[in-house]
Image (spheres, rainbow, N blue to C red):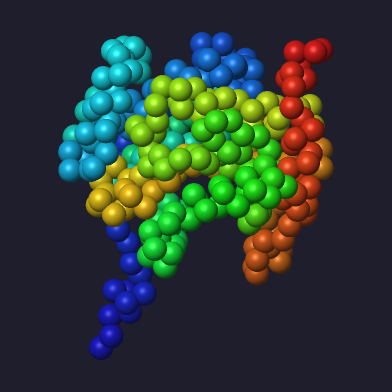
Amino acid sequence: MVDLSSLLLRAESVTGKCFVLTFSPKHHITLADMPASEILPIVSTWTRIYAAHLAPTNPLASVAQKTLSLMGPAPAESLTPPPSQQLRYMQIFENKGAAMGCSNPHPHCQIWTTSTLPEEPAAEAVQLAKYRAEHRGRHLLADYVKLEAEKAERVVYQNESFLVVCPWWAVWPFEAMIIAKRHARALVDLTASERLRFADAIQEVARRYDNLFETSFPYSSGIHQAPLDGTAEEVENSWLHMHFYPPLLRSATVRKFLVGYELMAEPQRDITPEQATARLCGCAGELYRKKL
């Protein structure tokens, strides 16, 4: 007799650890209010926590040691205890605003480390590996950065090290990505100047979002990078980037919902990435509430 439970019902236990990192002692501000110089310590803390959880066999472990030595001593408040077990992946993410389920208004992010590779990073890893295998070692996101930089029609902002785009495949109305211009596999690959430029790119996205509808713009954001415990090939396939998924559509009170056809069949675009880019490009400059 066929055991239908073992055939159809599958589960895997996952263990891990989570952290909450506050961005500032000023509980009324967000990343949009903070200059890049104040976001830089956040990026540095992300880097230290990621490095502390790397597997000794990870090719990035030696890189991390060098990066940390150049960064100098860690502030006491950024130190985390060493993991009691080797974990597979670290997901750094922020839910901003009540619309995204954030129950604590103070500016903060979360860091979850898990014993397995989660579905979204795993799906990306498959495509990154497939592209390299089919295109003689070229990186998908390297080629995508080159394409977007040449076309320029979906580029919201760029500095020397990072490109900000509303991606071609965007589902959310003002969805954005920050992508490293060179092959940085993880945060520990970044130099001091690159960490500052990453902070600058994050600030640009957050500020332009708030300026768009003159509101504290809700979003979920997250960093994708090489796994903590990965093979040399997995690490080499990785390319540091950050996703921003915002729900607002037409105003501070009108949001997109993935329902009906979009839930049962496939997502639909309310505006094109090119239209979203044009809107966000027009939102540069001083944060709107500083003018009030």
Residue 110, given in percent of the width and then of the height, sits at 45, 32
Q: Quadrant of the N terminus?
A: bottom left
Residue 60, given in percent of the width and then of the height, sits at 27, 39
Residue drawn at point x = 68 percent, y = 50 percent: 151
Residue drawn at point x = 36 percent, y = 34 percent: 189
Numbered label tally? 0
Residue drawn at point x = 31 percent, y = 48 percent: 235
Is 48 left or right of 217, judged from the image as shown? left
Q: Is residue 180 above or below residue 203?
A: below
Of 24 and 70, nearer the camera is 70
Q: Is residue 67 above or below residue 271?
A: above
Q: Quadrant of the C terminus?
A: top right
Q: Residue 258: which quarter of the image?
A: bottom right
Q: Residue 48: which quarter of the image?
A: top left
Residue 254 in view (yes/no) = no
Is 35 left or right of 23, judged from the image as shown? right
Residue drawn at point x = 51 percent, y = 29 percent: 198
Residue 9, given in percent of the width and then of the height, sits at 35, 70
